[in-house]
Amino acid sequence: LQKPSFDKRAFVKGVLKGEVRAASRLLTLIERRRPEARDVLKALYPHTGHAKLLGVTGPAGVGKSTLIDRLISGFRKNKQSVGVLAIDPRSPFTGGALLGDRLRMHRHFLDRGVFIRSLATTGSWGGISPSLFDAIHVFDAMGKDIILIETLGVGQDEVLIARLAETVLLVLAPGVGDEIQAMKAGLLEIGEIIAMNKADLIGAESFAEELSSIVAPRPVVQVSAENGTGITGLISALSTAMKANGSNRLKKKAFVREELRVLYQEKVLAMEDRAMFGDKILEAILKRKSDPYSLIDGWPIPRTESLVKRGATKNVS
Amino acid sequence: LQKPSFDKRAFVKGVLKGEVRAASRLLTLIERRRPEARDVLKALYPHTGHAKLLGVTGPAGVGKSTLIDRLISGFRKNKQSVGVLAIDPRSPFTGGALLGDRLRMHRHFLDRGVFIRSLATTGSWGGISPSLFDAIHVFDAMGKDIILIETLGVGQDEVLIARLAETVLLVLAPGVGDEIQAMKAGLLEIGEIIAMNKADLIGAESFAEELSSIVAPRPVVQVSAENGTGITGLISALSTAMKANGSNRLKKKAFVREELRVLYQEKVLAMEDRAMFGDKILEAILKRKSDPYSLIDGWPIPRTESLVKRGATKNVS
């Protein structure tokens, strides 16, 4: 059997046309960190930078999926195409998909303007998986106007991911009131806009008040994803925020800086079995002639300036 | 109020004498990644390299704690001092300690030859937290003959940690038989020696047989931590393995290499808000004149040879 050759151009063409099949296959290669994906991503990159990134996070049980379903419909009514990226904190042993499959079955399945995909992150990276950045570029190159990044909002990774999205929506609900104390530690700091779902529940009013006092001056928008109430107001608040953040150069730079750092970390990790730390160094440490701390103190991190001088970057004047 | 000055020499002296108070305070500084800890670790490092590392892992409910309690007693009878490092997969939101407190209350509390400590790992590092390496050096510098590293055995981090220990004991029990299929994916590959605890349970015999066929040629040692049966045999098997592995230079080099990589990653992570990636680069990428992938492709990773030449390492001839 001959190994099928990898047709980079077909991938690039397909993704730029917005084809789900090409994008899906590329995302699988990305998840597996296959080097071919990187070549496609390089070719796609010049076509990116147009999508708006909307992070949606919140604890389990607040009705995030139903609300996202409503948001998709709202964005579609406004003639915006939507990509949904569900971050899936997959266990390396079970390999199970927690969020994605559920989402894929939604009523937007047949809408060509919506592309929903779950992305497994093993959590073994220093913060954010490089796959997440790659996937965002794929959605962007497909021409999606809005990329909605859904996370569970329970761990460190979710905090980092939420920080990456230009605009972040935190979803809460009256039922999770007992956990508010615990949430104060970190979750409630996330979110430019806070949506309180299940606003029709008994006790929602007092929960909303308590919440407002904690997160002020950020707004708490009361919605009921189940009944569809309050959704128009939320969409409008999100659209205004996304538009403002979309032209925020500092946020865009922070995104690129984070991506470069993650890619560099991946490169460092890939060096594991190679000659980064040679035998002479290892022997010196084993003999206690040196120590790992002093060694790394003296170990340089390459910086922009020297690289630009040496011409290691391309097209940087 | 004046800030109390940090007495590095007192820490070094205390740890080298095996004092629990100095070691505990140092480990707290290590968990918080405080820079003072690093200075102490540099001074301690020449005094390390004597302890044997024993990883103990396995799913919840197999009686790991009771078995470890028995192992400690056994090692103590053989006049060996023991440090127990319980890896605690702490959530960044709850901040709860899962393993350590339980362990601290055991009957070895008053034995000066035993030091038990839990270490929180946030899991936000690329694989292993640098704190784990640091803590091992502290236990080692205290003069512990055996450092027992306990992990839950459920995630990627635990696999990596188990790989680090020179000798690894995997603990299973008949009650977790249903999970064996799932475990095959990764957990059963870990462990040089496999202990089947609760050997006195009904059905244990057939479970041990099934297990033996899966993990062969590695031995399955049947024990009952509750009754104390089989412990002597397990201690003897572990001691033999630890002795052999203790002089395995390849394993020791792999440990140092991993530590250097983790320390370097931490250094890269700490660069986050600084000038690693300058404004010129970020602007070029935002304008799509370059892309992050090509940029990182051209970004160098420093290598041993060049550093040795430039004299960046100390005492490496």
Image: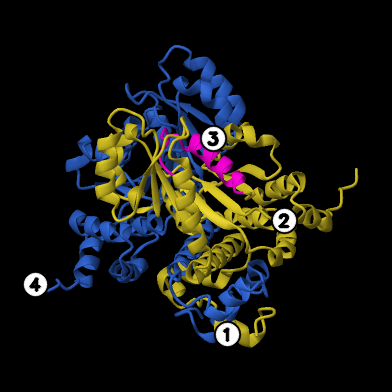
Chain colours: A blue, B yellow
Q: Identify the image quadrant of the N terminus of chain A.
A: bottom left
Label 4 and label 3: CA atoms lie apart by 52 Å
Q: How many marks?
A: 4
Q: Residue at position x 64%, y 36% from top?
A: B108
Report the amino acid beneath label 1. Ser
Report the amino acid beneath label 4. Leu
Dot 4 and dot 3 within a common chain: no
Callout 4–callout 2 Cβ contact below 8 Å: no
Label 4 and label 2: CA atoms lie apart by 57 Å
Q: Residue at position x 36%, y 36% from top?
A: B173
Dot 1 and dot 3 within a common chain: yes
Specify whether A39 is left or right of A207. left
Q: Which residue is mark 1?
A: B306
Q: Name the outermost residue toward the bottom.
A: B309
Q: Which residue is mark 2?
A: B37
Which chain letter matches label 2?
B
Residue B311: x, y in percent?
67, 84
Label 2 and label 1: CA atoms lie apart by 29 Å
Which chain letter matches label 1?
B
